[in-house]
Amino acid sequence: MKRALVPLLVASFAPRAIAQESDYDYANGDRFGSALVEIGDQDRDGVRDLAVSCPAVYGELGGSRVWIFSGRSGAVIAQVGETFESFVGRSLANAGDVDLDGADDVVFSVGADRAEVWSVAHGLLLALSAPRWEHMFETTVGSPGDVDTDGASDVVAGAALWSGCDGRLLRRLDSIGELARDSTAMSIVPDLDGDGCSEFAFVVVDTSATHIVVVSSATGVELFRTPPIGVPGTKFVPQADGSYRQAPDFDAPERLRVQSAFASDLDGDGRQDLAACSIELESWRVLGIGTSSNAAGSVFELATGPKDGWEPRLIGGLASGQPPNALLLCSTFMWVSAQRRALGSDAIRWEIDAHDGHTSEAWGSISASASVEDLDGDGCREIALGVVPDGDVGFPGYVQIRSGRDGVVLRELDRRSALLQVHARR
């Protein structure tokens, strides 16, 4: 029988005491809500819970941490990863059950070159190197499942896949052919080859086209790739001999994002498909990607529109027990607004200003979104939105949980109220 991983640090299940914090933390633009993810039921009340990151920037007072909130009540369950390092939790994901205690763990980035896996019950489990992808700004984190079949979920940190059992390196992802030099983004997408593990989807750019390449997480073998999707910009790179070489311009306007939350049958062939968001210079597109053996990698358009400050995101499973079906458009020019639309339709289900109810005139943006459990009993899952300040403006970040059906605010979370809960329990 496999023995559970021995944690590196031991922490109690109850929220722990934190360093003293000043009013500076509340007033000067904390980044609470920069990333969020739904995780398993930590407090055993029958409802999945929510992890929210609050990364400090350049050594702000109060430091960084990831908060765990009850999905049922919104109460603080725990804090993990407290540190005074900057940019902790910019990337955050559900790590699956790494320590085999029956509850999901969380994995998040620590700066530009590390990641940590934490258990709510047992504390720090793994501190991992996160080797950089050459053309990726954010540190990728996530879990494809138990790739090495030892019973524990394994973890992606940067350009590498690590064993959740003992932290050993399983595979360098950037050693897979052209992915080593040309990838600009990576996502973990649902299992497509029937081995029980999720797959890796890479956005690969060369001088003539952009492709999405799907690779088995278990074997590293390419499963399929799309035909060219858009034409990236190019630039001329000076060489040592004084000549110039044409190369992809990774700062060109078009950028693709593969969204693992969306995995329903889009083309009617009975198999789950993938979807990607393409942000172009003047417009956006949502693309479906076929996965059946006779149509693997085929691309079809699901939605499109003028950019006009909007950036598309796909929200999965809003109708309980139904496949994902919603497109959330978030404004990107510092207006905190969003629209929910049904894919394949221009009809707007609801439109909101996420600054409603706030007295601050400061500008911010929606930095993260996720589908979470049905809170109002209408049979539709809800949408969690993380709102953070832009630049050095002075309002604190917050998370709103809104009805997936009509956009009404059901709950709001922020760091100050979370801290007050923790202090009241001392």
Image (cartoon, rainbow, N blue to C red):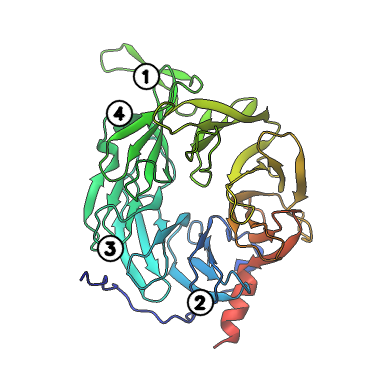
* Amino acid found under the numbered disc labelled 4: Glu
Tag 3 near tag 1, CB within 8 Å: no
Give the distance between the C-alpha atoms of the residues marked 2 and 4, in whole angstroms: 44 Å
Residue at 76% x, 37% y is 347
Percent of width and height locating residue 156: 34, 51
Kindly identify which numbered label has been placed on residue 237. 1
Q: CA distance from mark 1 to mark 2?
A: 55 Å
Residue labelled with disc 2: 43
Q: Amino acid at mark 2?
A: Asp
| First along the sequence among labels 2 and 3 | 2
Dot 3 lies on which element? loop
Give the crowd class for mark 4: few <14, some 14-19, many >=20 residues within 10 Å. few
Of the numbered discs 1 and 2, the one sitting upstream in the chain is 2
Q: Are marks 2 and 4 in contact (CB under 8 Å)?
A: no
Among numbered discs 3 and 4, the one appearing first in the sequence: 3
Q: Are marks 1 and 2 in contact (CB under 8 Å)?
A: no
Instruction: Give the number of the mark in front: 3 or 4.
Output: 3
Q: Where is mark 4, residue-wise?
A: 178
Q: Nearer the viewer's eye, disc 2 or disc 4?
A: 2
Answer left or right for 372 relative to 78.
Answer: right
| SS label for mark 1 | strand
What's the CA distance linking mark 3 and mark 1?
Answer: 47 Å
